[in-house]
Amino acid sequence: MGANKNAVFLGITILICLIAYRECASNYTFPSYFLFGTGTSSYQIEGAWNESGKGENLWDFVTHNTPEFIDDRSNGDIACDSYHKYEEDIALLKNLGVNFYRFSVSWARIYPNGYPYNPNQEGIAYYNTLIDALLAQNITPMLTIHHWDVPQRLQELGGWTNSRMVNIFTEYARTLLENFSDRIKYWITFNEPYTFCNEGYGSTRYAPALNMSGRADYLCAHNVLKSHAAVYHLFNNTYRSRNNATMGICLSAMWYEPSSPEDEEATERTRQFIIGLYSNPIFSTNGDYPEVMKEYIGNRSVAQGYSKSRLPQFTSDEIEFIKGTFDFLGMNHYTTRLARNSPPTNNMVSFNSDMQTEMWVNSSWPGGREPIVPSGFRKLLTWIKNTYNNPIVYITENGYGDNGELDDYVRVSYYGSYLEALLEAINEDNVNVRGYSAWSLMDNFEWKSGYTWRYGIYSVNFTDPNRPRTAKLSATFYKNVIANRAVGDYPSLS
Ligand SMILES: *[C@@H]1O[C@H](CO)[C@@H](O)[C@H](O)[C@H]1NC(C)=O
Ligand SMILES: *[C@@H]1O[C@H](CO)[C@@H](O)[C@H](O)[C@H]1NC(C)=O
Ligand SMILES: *[C@@H]1O[C@H](CO)[C@@H](O)[C@H](O)[C@H]1NC(C)=O
Ligand SMILES: *[C@@H]1O[C@H](CO)[C@@H](O)[C@H](O)[C@H]1NC(C)=O
Ligand SMILES: *[C@@H]1O[C@H](CO)[C@@H](O)[C@H](O)[C@H]1NC(C)=O
Ligand SMILES: *[C@@H]1O[C@H](CO)[C@@H](O)[C@H](O)[C@H]1NC(C)=O
Ligand SMILES: *[C@@H]1O[C@H](CO)[C@@H](O)[C@H](O)[C@H]1NC(C)=O
Ligand SMILES: *[C@@H]1O[C@H](CO)[C@@H](O)[C@H](O)[C@H]1NC(C)=O
Ligand SMILES: *[C@@H]1O[C@H](CO)[C@@H](O)[C@H](O)[C@H]1NC(C)=O
């Protein structure tokens, strides 16, 4: 895709900007309370897929049974081998100087077949060791309870479309709270429900790739929201005080920018369908799904001959039960899209035709596959502040994917410009962001992209059985940001 042309273009812009740098940079610094971290998830890094009593999960099943689903036919059987190399990973974190480390627990290590009885003590012991080793280095663990790796037996029962998952997930979470809440300060119930519900149940981009758009995605969202709330209440009522901890949920959000002023209403509808589907029930004053979703999906369902809306309804008790179940919003943000109105031309059932908009990339944005649009990051943060009454926000993921080169100038540019935008959001827009976690600590199994697409600030050599880690330029850059609590020099792309 014009890689050489891009490289030349980049080289020139980097030069220009290094020269012009003093003009590019603001002089803001991160507030004293602000925390820095990096993130990973269990299936993407651990490996040891069948060790120490771990059961099979959805991604084990998909990668083993339909390897063609993954771009390079790879899997997470070994991945970064972090299950064995966690001490080395903690040394990397220590070198970076991070305050916290965001990782997830592999559900099938705790409950090998998913059913919540007789937890696997070896699985619990592994995370006890990891947590203790982090604390010994003064690194605060931020624990994600569910980062997409559902035990396969539960997936066969319908996964997140099955309402029994609410109780099953709550019992799994209770086991983690029971064993770890004396030491965990930051809990996250779910990572990116939009991605696994809408793109896993609603399309074929992620496992389980059901492609039941406009149906299974809404069922998934409904059960995930109820599960989140049930676990939050359990935490709030019983476990919070053990370590004066906090709990939130991580939502993925691009910024959606109207492609023309007339498209502002359609663009706001896009934000409500993609972000508000999950954030409105939890973070808004009134709770429940966004009104615009109830109206659009309800009307279309009737026109399609359904007796009621394909979007499930919460009872008023459920609305109250879910509303306010957060201490913070975890925001995963990567890039921006343009949006405009796009009424469907047929009666097909799908999420996009319910939403009635389309999204695309402005070809003049730099960055390639994931355009680099730091102004979108700042606008998103302001939108969150204004829409949900200024909640505490942690940026739980932000980063840039590429082919894995060590001299990752574009990633450095990405981090530099997004951290600048974040500083402006904090200092000029008074957005309540308390911390930032770079995705990812190291190259890892990038789901459908396998090992062809890399987000690490450390490189991992996946052909070497020892899986050696090597710092990229971005690791050095991020280390300096943390040490100076300021962004410093970086090559700009604009
Ligand atoms: C940052 O500080 C330098 C030196 O004090 C100054 O020249 C520059 O104009 C400042 N930049 C901005 C954006 O305020
Ligand atoms: C675990 O899986 C590997 C393949 O990844 C296989 O070689 C090994 O025999 C399995 N071990 C057990 C205990 O099943
Ligand atoms: C996990 O917690 C349970 C209940 O408190 C306890 O019985 C068990 O020993 C703990 N497991 C480990 C490995 O510490
Ligand atoms: C997904 O479903 C849509 C609509 O039914 C269909 O057009 C498309 O071919 C399906 N995609 C795959 C990969 O099955
Ligand atoms: C508990 O944590 C909150 C911040 O989340 C802090 O304001 C409060 O002082 C802490 N309380 C105790 C008893 O440490
Ligand atoms: C695309 O980006 C260019 C350059 O920033 C801008 O001039 C143009 O208005 C953008 N197009 C749209 C539809 O926003
Ligand atoms: C949905 O239906 C109601 C009642 O017929 C109507 O007033 C409203 O305009 C419709 N909304 C949309 C977006 O079609
Ligand atoms: C959490 O617990 C506190 C103290 O018991 C209570 O005031 C608060 O309403 C609870 N939060 C939610 C969302 O239920
Ligand atoms: C990765 O490891 C393999 C096997 O040890 C080695 O041949 C190769 O040169 C390494 N690649 C890099 C980029 O270091």
Image (cartoon, helix red, strand yellow):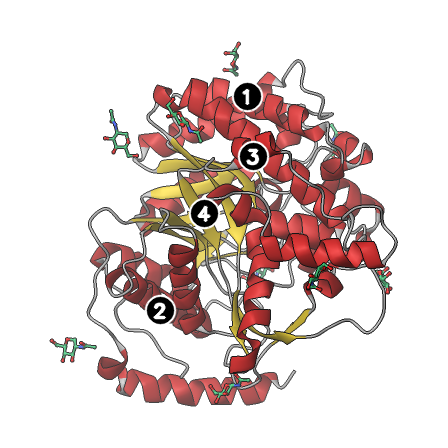
Q: Nearer the viewer, residue 197 or 441?
A: 197
Q: Amino acid at mark 2?
A: Gly
Q: Considering only order in the chain, which callout, 2 or 3, is on the residue closer to the N terminus?
A: 3
Q: At 44% from the left edge and 38% from the top edge, which residue is drawn?
A: 326
Q: Amino acid at mark 1?
A: Arg
Q: Give the CA separation, mark 1 to mark 3.
A: 12 Å
Could you tell me which quadrant the N terminus lies in?
bottom right
Whole-percent x and y of residue 333? 49, 59
Q: Is residue 318 above or below residue 200?
A: above
Per the rendering, the mark at residue 228 is 3
Q: Which residue is mark 1?
A: 174
Q: Give the CA separation, mark 3 to mark 4.
A: 13 Å
Q: At 35% from the left edge and 46% from the top edge, which residue is drawn?
A: 392
> Residue 70 sits in which quadrant?
bottom right
Q: Nearer the viewer, residue 287 or 169?
A: 287
Q: Which residue is mark 2?
A: 416
Q: Are marks 1 and 3 in contact (CB under 8 Å)?
A: no
One can see residue 81 in this view: yes
Q: Nearer the viewer, mark 1 or mark 2?
A: 1
Secondary structure category for the residue under label 4:
strand
Q: Considering only order in the chain, which callout, 4 or 2, is on the residue closer to the N terminus?
A: 4
Secondary structure category for the residue under label 2:
helix
Q: Amino acid at mark 4?
A: Gly
Q: Is residue 189 above or below residue 8?
A: above
Q: Is residue 473 above or below residue 225?
A: below
Q: Nearer the viewer, residue 268 or 191?
A: 268
In screen coordinates, is 213 left or right of 105?
Answer: right
Q: Nearer the viewer, mark 3 or mark 2?
A: 3
Q: Considering only order in the chain, which callout, 2 or 1, is on the residue closer to the N terminus?
A: 1
Q: Which residue is mark 4?
A: 330
Whole-percent x and y of residue 155? 77, 36
One can see residue 105 in this view: no
